[in-house]
Image (spheres, coloured by chain):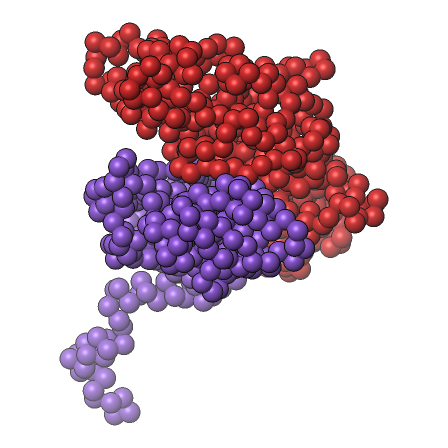
């Protein structure tokens, strides 16, 4: 008798030990929770994999859906100006109009001034001469095919058809030529030839300073490339109209409507494709998870046989599914962001900014799909006696 | 024995087969729909890109310079050479005539409006086709600015709507003029300057022409008058004269071959170049079709549509891969689940002496049947889905290539096999004793 330590029989001690060794009820729950994942890690891993893939695909699609529109809008800005500002009849644009626009709008828009004059060549042909800012015009009109951009004063960019008039006999097109405007002559060196297939081919372009020194004409037109959605462009047009009360601010409908048309169709297609893909991957999760839960009908039966209440069993499976959904959503989200960034890089040669805003949708969606996948087989099993399941029938 | 096993399996386990079958059907349907959309999207977007207007312009070979500032043409009307209107239907006889969406001739001239009035004004009058029927050979097509310039808009102008008493009378008048009428459209910025409204007449070089509407384009035409081509030819007394033709064509994005000079190509390369709908080769063919002409791409439109098109096509390709991947995964998951549930059966078969090969054969045969049935139903459902997408988004049919059917079916079988393979291998390897005792 003395071999047994007295402390063993001390009810107080026992109570204390019990309190130490047997964790509270919630702990049993967590233990089952983790043991289930560890013991059946293959099945759990395949269910988790399905979850991760579905969440990743959904994240990538949602990211792309938002981002592709912005990227495509960027592509559409290569079409050049979508807004044009011209002086109202009998009025002129303020001299600092471009500076004013830039200080108001900043980097969101690109404003390029143009001034026009009709000059005469030596042999008496009329030709339109345009003064502009070459560095800005180059950014605005990326489709201009230019053999060489002028980089010094009094160097001209000569349109393809105008080149045939002003320098008809020189093969290199580098011969200086003379133009007169209202009796004032100017000597210009052609720097390069401009080819666009439109009205620009008939014109000669000069930098604004040289042009103004020669003709005294200030810019009469400002071409503006406003970026953003249709609503943003409209508000930018209103702001510009307020800023320049002496000018008419007109949208270039050809560009704006063309862009809206193509973008709407692309967005709708993308939306349909994204919806289909998300549906398919949810189905994949549903199939895998249902199999996983169904496969554990013995656990279910055993828990019930040991006296667990219906609510506890349901709660247990639901919690498991929800946890699986959440873990899958988080992992899948980051993988999906990676896929979206890669697609943006591969297709648009630009970085896709991760949209963390879609995370709640992915999380909620994953958990809901997981819960549905868990509840369906449980409701089916509830009708079956635990004994039958345990006997393996 | 083998067919009976497979048959009985379908008869008695209808629920499980149904689940796997549904997964295959849905997966195949999604794959079919996205492939069909992706193969057709290039053509569809190309057509949508035509809403940017013409991408080619044809002008006389010996053309003089345009002298135009702010929509006002400063060139005397007699100056320069013209194309002949009678040559235009030949555009329909070109090699790539099916790619020509439409074309619009333009004849800009300078006229005096409001003669006899102190406020006589020099204005550019443009003659064009609005929606004219052109006959070439046996076929008749309509073309004109309504097709090539879809952003042109004819209305009654703002002034009309604010005066309800007049709006009613004018609502009949505000319309596109017909191509053989003497009706004109005036630009929305020009109308207030002339103080004219639709329904009234305007004195153009001594002729009284009826204004049938206010034209809004957001471009130079807002300050101009637009009239039927025949009328403008009468005014300048040059029948058949056309200054330029704007052509809207479906083109292929340009690549290294497109920009080569056709004169220096070998005959073989030249044939390939000629028979590709590059904007350059269509320009070349336009020059062939219309005598004494020079055709050129309008770089603003032509250069950019290639980039936009290839971006959208690339995007759809990637999305198609994503869809195929997701469908493949869904099918494999369903198949794996269906097979995993049947370990007891495998155990029994093995205990009765079946070899791994025989057991696998049964499963693969079942998978094959499921894939074929699911593939056929899924293909039809996917084709319907693609049609629905085409109709609701692009207002046109998305054609399903018949060659897609065997490809889709083959993919369905391969994916089903691949999805089942791992599960079958595990099921076959499983010790029959454990399986039969229900410890798995």
- Position in image of residue B172 (x %, y %): 35, 8
Outermost residue on the left side: it is: A12
Residue B80 position by quadrant:
top right
How many numbered marks appear?
0
- Position in image of residue B311 (x %, y %): 54, 48
Q: Residue at x 40, y 37 (%)?
A: B70
Q: Is residue B33 above or below residue A370?
A: above
Q: Is residue B85 above or below residue B10?
A: above
Residue A99 position by quadrant:
bottom left
Q: Residue at x 54, y 33 (%)?
A: B54
Q: Residue at x 41, y 66 (%)?
A: A35
Note whether residue B378 is visible: no
Quadrant location of the N terminus of chain A in the rendered image: bottom left
Q: Is residue B56 above or below residue B434?
A: above
Is B43 on the left-hand or right-hand side of B70? right
Outermost residue on the front side: it is: A183
Is B168 on the left-hand or right-hand side of B44? left
Outermost residue on the bottom side: it is: A2
Residue B410 position by quadrant:
top right
Q: Is residue A301 above or below residue B160?
A: below
- Position in image of residue B380 (x %, y %): 61, 29
Is B188 on the left-hand or right-hand side of A343? left
Q: Residue at x 28, y 24 (%)?
A: B192
The purple one among the chains is A
**A370 or A24: which is nearer to us?**
A370
The red one among the chains is B
- Position in image of residue B214 (x %, y %): 35, 21
Note whether residue B276 is visible: yes
């Amino acid at each position: 008798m003395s071999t047994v330590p007295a402390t063993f029989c001390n009810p107080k001690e026992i109570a204390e030990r019990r309190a130490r060794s047997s964790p509270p009820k919630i702990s049993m729950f967590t233990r089952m929770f983790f043991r289930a994942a560890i013991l059946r890690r293959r099945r759990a891993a395949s269910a988790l994999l399905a979850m991760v893939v579905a969440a990743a695909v959904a994240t990538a699609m949602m990211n792309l859906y938002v981002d592709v529109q912005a990227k495509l809008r960027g592509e559409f800005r290569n079409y050049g100006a979508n807004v044009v500002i011209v002086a109202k009849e009998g009025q002129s644009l303020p001299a600092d109009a471009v500076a004013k626009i830039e200080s108001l709008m900043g980097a969101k828009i690109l404003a390029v001034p143009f001034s026009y004059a009709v000059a005469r060549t030596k042999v008496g042909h009329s030709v339109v001469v345009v003064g502009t800012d070459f560095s800005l015009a180059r950014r605005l009109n990326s489709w201009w095919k230019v053999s060489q951009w002028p980089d010094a004063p009094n160097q001209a960019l000569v349109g393809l058809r105008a080149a045939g008039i002003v320098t008809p006999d020189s093969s290199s097109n580098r011969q200086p030529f003379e133009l007169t405007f209202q009796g004032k002559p100017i000597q210009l060196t052609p720097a390069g030839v401009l080819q666009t297939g439109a009205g620009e081919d008939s014109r000669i372009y000069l930098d604004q300073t040289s042009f103004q020194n020669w003709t005294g004409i200030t810019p009469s037109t400002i071409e503006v490339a406003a970026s953003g959605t249709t609503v943003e462009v409209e508000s930018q047009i209103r702001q510009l109209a307020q800023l320049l009360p002496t000018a008419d601010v007109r949208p270039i409908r050809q560009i704006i409507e063309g862009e809206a048309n193509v973008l709407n169709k692309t967005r709708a297609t993308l939306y349909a494709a994204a919806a289909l893909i998300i549906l398919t991957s949810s189905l994949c999760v549903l199939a895998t998870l249902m199999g996983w839960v169904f496969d554990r009908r013995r656990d279910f039966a055993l828990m019930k046989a040991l006296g667990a209440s219906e609510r506890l069993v349901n709660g247990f499976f639901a919690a498991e599914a929800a946890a699986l959904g959440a873990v899958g959503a988080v992992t899948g989200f980051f993988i999906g962001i990676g896929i979206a960034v890669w697609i943006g890089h591969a297709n648009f040669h630009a970085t896709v900014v991760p949209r963390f805003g879609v995370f709640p949708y992915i999380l909620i969606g994953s958990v809901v799909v997981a819960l549905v996948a868990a509840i369906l087989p449980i409701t089916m099993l509830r009708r079956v006696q635990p004994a039958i399941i345990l006997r393996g029938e | 024995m083998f067919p009976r096993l497979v048959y009985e399996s379908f008869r008695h386990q209808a629920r499980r087969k149904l689940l796997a079958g549904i997964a295959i059907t849905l997966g195949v349907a999604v794959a079919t729909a996205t492939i069909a959309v992706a193969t057709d999207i290039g053509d569809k977007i190309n057509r949508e890109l035509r809403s940017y207007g013409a991408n080619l312009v044809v002008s006389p070979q010996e053309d003089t310079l345009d002298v135009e500032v702010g929509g006002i043409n400063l060139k005397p009307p007699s100056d320069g050479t013209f194309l002949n209107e009678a040559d235009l239907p030949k555009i329909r006889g070109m090699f790539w005539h099916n790619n020509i969406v439409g074309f619009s001739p333009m004849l800009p001239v300078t006229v005096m409006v409001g003669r006899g009035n102190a406020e006589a004004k020099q204005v550019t009058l443009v003659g064009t086709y609005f929606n004219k029927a052109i006959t070439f050979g046996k076929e008749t097509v309509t073309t004109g600015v309504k097709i090539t310039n879809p952003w042109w808009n004819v209305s009654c102008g703002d002034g009309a709507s604010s005066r309800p008493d007049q709006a009613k009378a004018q609502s009949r008048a505000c319309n596109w003029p017909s191509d053989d009428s003497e009706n004109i459209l005036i630009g929305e910025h020009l109308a207030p300057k002339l103080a004219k409204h639709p329904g009234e007449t305007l004195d153009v070089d001594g002729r009284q022409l009826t204004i049938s509407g206010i034209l809004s384009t957001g471009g130079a035409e807002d300050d101009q008058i637009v009239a039927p081509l025949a009328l403008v030819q009468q005014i300048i007394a040059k029948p058949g004269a056309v200054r330029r033709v704007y052509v809207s064509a479906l083109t292929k994005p340009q690549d290294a071959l497109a920009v080569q000079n056709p004169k220096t190509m070998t005959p073989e390369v030249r044939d390939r170049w000629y028979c590709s709908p590059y904007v350059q080769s269509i320009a070349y063919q336009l020059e062939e079709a219309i005598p004494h002409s020079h055709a050129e791409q309008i770089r603003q439109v032509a250069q950019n549509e290639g980039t936009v098109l290839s971006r959208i096509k690339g995007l759809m390709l990637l999305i198609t891969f994503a869809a195929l991947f997701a469908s493949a995964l869904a099918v494999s998951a369903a198949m794996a689940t269906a097979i995993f549930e049947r370990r007891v059966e495998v155990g029994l078969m093995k205990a009765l002496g079946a070899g791994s090969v025989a057991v696998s054969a049964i499963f693969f045969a079942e998978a094959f049947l499921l894939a074929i049935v699911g593939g056929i139903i899924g293909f039809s459902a996917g084709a319907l889905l693609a049609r629905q997408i085409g109709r609701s988004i692009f207002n046109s049919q998305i054609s399903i290539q018949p060659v897609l059917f065997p490809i889709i079916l083959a993919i369905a079988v391969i994916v089903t096999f691949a999805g089942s393979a791992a599960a079958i291998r595990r099921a076959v390897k499983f010790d029959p004793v454990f399986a039969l005792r229900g410890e798995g």
